[in-house]
Amino acid sequence: MLSIGLTGGIGSGKSRVADLLAQWGAALIDTDVIAHALTGPQGEAMPALREAFGVQAVTAEGALNRAWMRERVFRDPDAKARLEGILHPLISRHAREQGERARGAYRVYVVPLLVESGRWRDKVDRICVVDCDPETQISRVRERSGLTPDGIRAIMAAQSTREARLQVADDVILNDGATSAALLHERTRMMHDRWIALAAALGTTRGRQASA
Ligand code: ADP
């Protein structure tokens, strides 16, 4: 099955794009959802996180104390590496298992930090970037979350730049400040139609290879 890695900076609109693709029949595998489940109450990653970071990292409900951890990894690159060392292999395994079970026209792995992590590039057939200018990212996230512009800029500074994302992109969906919701819908539909055609072509080639 054709696999797409969908990425983009915070507020770029990748959740919107992913929702549309799912409505049209793509199988979504969302690594943020997986990460939340792993670090929720009694989540699979919690024993290792408690071991690595102590009881302060765990809420009374047995979930990850996100505010504490965010603060910690911001100040301490070693802590960030330890956190990722625990979470990333688990996320990869669950994403792979979900991908194997997935039924749909093609698979879409939603990976916010795809460009940053390096683990994903050879696991997908194509990388699609939802592209947006930084000013629009800030205003969208501000409306959605109530974070301050400085807080949002700090998150963006820890992510890849727009240019670095575009450099690894096979496909780009532009969703900048001049893109209305209707235009995003149209651009996403064009991409979907292209992937459907590609999935059909790939199905034929892979089928031929398998029977050769
Ligand atoms: P991401 O998942 O990349 O962080 P979202 O898809 O959640 O981004 O989009 C961020 C916010 O901006 C959401 O509230 C979303 O509804 C809104 N948004 C995204 N694209 C558009 C657009 N083209 N027009 C209007 N609002 C948009």
Image (cartoon, rainbow, N blue to C red):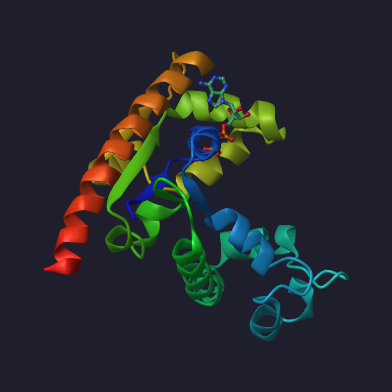
- Quarter of the render that holds ligand 1: top right
Image quadrant where residue 173 sits: top left
Residue ID at (74%, 65%): 40
Answer left or right for 145 relative to 112: right
* Up/down of 160 relative to 13, above or below: below
Indicate the position of residue 41 as horizontal and vertical percent values. 79, 69
- Quadrant containing the C terminus is bottom left
Instruction: Classify 27 as above or below 121.
Output: above
Please give the name of the residue rendered at 72% of the width and 32% of the height, measured from the top-left corner.
146
Whether residue 180 is visible, yes or no, is no
Q: Residue furthest left?
A: 212
Residue at point 48%, 54% (across, down): 103
Along the horizontal axis of the image, is 63 left or right of 111?
A: right
Q: Nearer the viewer, residue 8 or 105?
A: 105
Q: Which residue appears at 29% of the width and 45% of the height?
A: 199
Residue 2 rendering spot, x and y as whole percentages = 32, 51
Q: Quadrant of residue 209?
A: bottom left
Classify 61 as above or below 52: above
Counting from the top left corner in percent of width and height, residue 96 is at 45, 68
Relative to 102, is 16 above or below?
above
